[in-house]
Amino acid sequence: MSLPRRSWVEVSLGAVAANFRAVRNLVGEGVTVAAVVKADAYRHGAVEVARVLEQEGAQWFAVSNAEEGLELREAGIAARILVMADGPHVARLGLTPVIHSLDALRELPAGAAYHLKLDTGMGRLGTREPVAAIVEAVRKCPAQLEGLMTHFASSADYIGTQTDEQLSAFDAAATALHAAGLAPRYRHACSTIPIAYGRRAAWHNMVRPGMALYGYVSPARGDAPPSELRLQPALTWKASILEVKDVPKGAHIGYGAGFTTPRPMRIGILALGYADGLPHRLSGRGRVIAAGEWAPVLGAVSMDLTTIDLTAAPHLQVGDSVTILGREGDLTQDAQALARSAGTISYSLLCGIHERVRRVYLP
Ligand SMILES: *Cc1c(COP(=O)(O)O)cnc(C)c1O
């Protein structure tokens, strides 16, 4: 029996593939694109996304941890898989570890390929040891240094100089390693933002786009060049209407009577709440698209339910759907706009879409 849908996402695999091609065309032949599919491909579905990108010719994927890498392997993904935030043990699982401390080099099996991460100023993962110590440790290690990488803390910031400083530090380290005879095949530093804004000096010969694949580039601060990527959001989020009713003026809506109707109103109750990933912070401030019109959230978003104002879409009925993310008629709400209303970021909003929200794949 197929149950009626409560809330679901539609993922366009064609859009993901087109976004991947856009990145590849921009960076050109000499730069390998490692497609970042961590966090279940930002909730777009890591296995399906990796399958479609492998068909597009992707030779590298990047995930966060061993479980995510093994999920891809078990689904038959044959491409290389870089594990960015786990330990050296992943080398024994057919995955490629990012090593962030010189101590961890000792645990690598002989012959395993690894990428070494430098902390050039982000203050997160990556070694901060001086180059001489790195050279000594890498020479002693029987595994193979295949990549040298770093990550930028402020790549969208075109006012400050942190990215330039990090890039200089990275390039200086790479040059010193090279002088010591250590020339890893790959050097990489860039996620979506420095790809999109054309920071070519930072591309080196591998880039690690995540958000771009899903159709987004965050806005930059300051005097940034325009984004060079034409992308389309790949995910649409919908919810069904469980109940429609007319309430009189002065009716209280939801927990804490967060909203009181100023006039008789038609309201709709959505089968969607914060347990599905709709941020509670959208209480009384978010909106969805109902029959091509804006429908504001009324009162508190609750765990499984959200009430909306159907004044502008009075003909909608039980079983009809509304759009949380996506387009209806002339209106569009994307993850950046909705995240802004919720006081969060698009990444967190997408990654917060809960597993219980059914996923439907479109070609
Ligand atoms: C998540 C992540 C990326 C991808 O970032 P986007 O902004 O989504 O492109 C790249 N590199 C590292 C180290 C990451 O953690």
Image (spheres, rainbow, N blue to C red):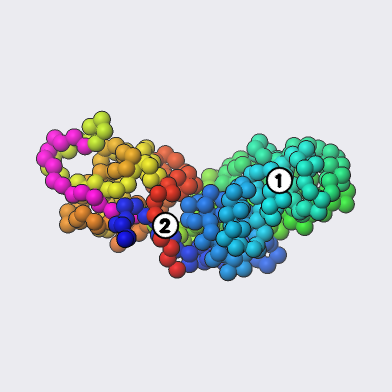
Q: Nearer the viewer, residue 212 or 127?
A: 127
Circle count: 2
Percent position (x, y) of residue 281?
37, 37
Residue sticking out furthest to the top: 256
Compared across the picture, whether 147 is left or right of 337 comes to: right
Q: Quadrant of the C terminus?
A: bottom left
Residue sticking out furthest to the front: 1
Q: Residue at x 52, y 52 (%)?
A: 40
Q: Residue at x 88, y 52 (%)?
A: 181
Q: Quadrant of residue 187?
A: bottom right
Instruction: Nearest to the eye among marks 2 and 1: give it.
Output: 1
Identify the residue position indicated by label 2 in the image: 359
Task: Determine which of the numbered discs, if any, sits on residue 54 in the image.
Answer: none
Q: Is residue 346 visible?
A: no
Dominant secondary structure of the residues highlighted in magenta in the image: strand
Up/down of 255 relative to 167, above or below: above
Q: Quadrant of residue 168?
A: top right
Tag 1 or tag 2, which sits nearer the N-term? Answer: 1
Q: Is residue 81 visible?
A: yes
Identify the residue position indicated by label 1 in the image: 89
Q: Nearer the viewer, residue 73 or 286?
A: 73
Task: Tell me which segment is drawn in magenta.
Answer: 238-253
Q: Residue at x 68, y 52 (%)?
A: 93
Q: Residue at x 41, y 60 (%)?
A: 360
User: Any magenta on residue 355?
Assistant: no
Q: Quadrant of the N terminus?
A: bottom left
Up/down of 9 relative to 164, above or below: below
Check disc 1: other Cα within 10 Å, few if <14, some if 14-19, many if 20+: some
